[in-house]
Image: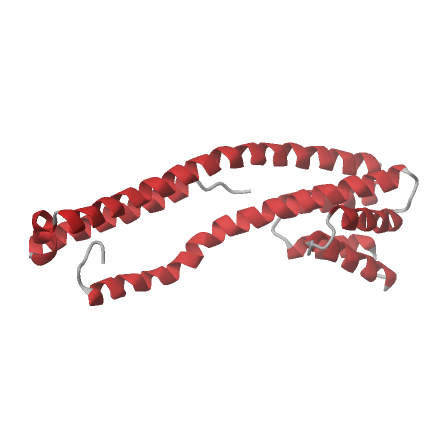
């Protein structure tokens, strides 16, 4: 109703709001991926400690699960659930390598894929699993630290974008309230409606581009 004082037109344009969840999916997916990476890094830290203490990989995972549950009490942690599934599969005589590969297929996460690839290669080539895990942890930690720094910067810019996207709407609403006589031609004539349509399109393009710029992949 800001750009058109016509209920039917406004409701018709509002139907495009059904595309909003799709536009937000990328941001939600990135945030969820970062959360999984942090949980996975924490789990790898604990598994590495278990392996360094002389435990087998299965026992190191059990140790990691117990410790991680202490770090995240009363919380639904996806990584804990997934590693519990891995342990159940190994107890049903499935190899831990295939259990890890099935775990990898559930997530579109680079860190998980890298770890599984490194583990499979280490198992096949007889490499040092503890060193391989530590290298993976270092890589994940560096990436997460970088992403967290970027997230702080991006969060500030996102706030600025949201504030700036509200300003045009506020200005139009104020003009409608205090000086409608000056802007009435924009709502009551064909040329005015064309002008408002172009303005609306430019506004939407500006908001879309601003959101696109402030979004980064993980």
Q: Looking at the image, which is closer to me, 26 or 122?
A: 26
Q: Which residue is at 71% across, 52% downward? A: 79
Placement of 111 over or under 187, stated as above or below = above
Q: Position of residue 152 (x, y in %)?
A: 52, 34
Q: Position of residue 92 (x, y in %)?
A: 85, 64
Q: Which residue is at 39% across, 44% downward? A: 211
Q: Residue furthest right?
A: 54
Q: Looking at the image, which is closer to me, 127 or 61?
A: 61
Q: How is the image coloured?
A: secondary structure
Q: Residue furthest bottom?
A: 8
Q: Looking at the image, which is closer to me, 33 or 172?
A: 172
Residue 127 visible somewhere in the drawing: no
Q: Which residue is at 21% across, 64% downward? A: 9
Q: How many marks?
A: 0
- Left or right? Give the position of 17 relative to 42: left
- Left or right? Give the position of 66 relative to 182: right
Q: Looking at the image, which is closer to me, 153 or 180?
A: 180
Residue 14 visible somewhere in the drawing: yes
Q: Residue furthest front?
A: 178
- Left or right? Give the position of 92 relative to 3: right
Q: Position of residue 182 (x, y in %)?
A: 8, 47
> Can you say which quadrant of the picture contains the C terminus?
top right
> Can you say which quadrant of the picture contains the N terminus?
bottom left
Placement of 47 over or under 188, stated as above or below = above
- Left or right? Give the position of 156 relative to 103: left
Res 189 quadrant in image: bottom left
Q: Which residue is at 65% across, 48% downward? A: 36
Res 34 quadrant in image: top right
């Amino acid at each position: 109703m800001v750009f058109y004082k016509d209920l039917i037109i406004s409701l018709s344009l509002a139907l495009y709001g059904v595309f909003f969840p799709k536009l937000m999916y990328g941001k939600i997916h990135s945030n969820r991926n970062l959360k999984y990476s942090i949980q996975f890094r924490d789990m790898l830290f604990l598994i590495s400690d278990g392996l360094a203490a002389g435990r087998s990989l299965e026992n190191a995972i059990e140790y990691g699960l117990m410790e991680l549950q202490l770090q995240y009490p009363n919380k639904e942690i996806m990584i804990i659930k997934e590693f519990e599934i891995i342990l159940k599969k190994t107890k049903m005589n499935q190899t831990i390598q295939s259990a890890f590969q099935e775990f990898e297929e559930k997530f579109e996460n680079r860190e998980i894929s890298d770890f599984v690839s490194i583990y499979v290669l280490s198992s096949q080539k007889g490499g040092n699993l503890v060193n391989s895990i530590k290298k993976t942890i270092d890589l994940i930690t560096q990436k997460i630290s970088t992403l967290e720094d970027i997230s702080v910067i991006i969060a500030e810019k996102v706030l600025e974008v949201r504030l700036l996207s509200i300003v045009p709407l506020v200005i139009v609403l104020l003009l409608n309230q205090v000086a409608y006589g000056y802007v009435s031609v924009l709502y009551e004539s064909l040329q005015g409606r064309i002008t408002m349509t172009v303005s609306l399109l430019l506004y939407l393009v500006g908001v879309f581009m601003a959101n696109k710029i402030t979004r980064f992949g993980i």
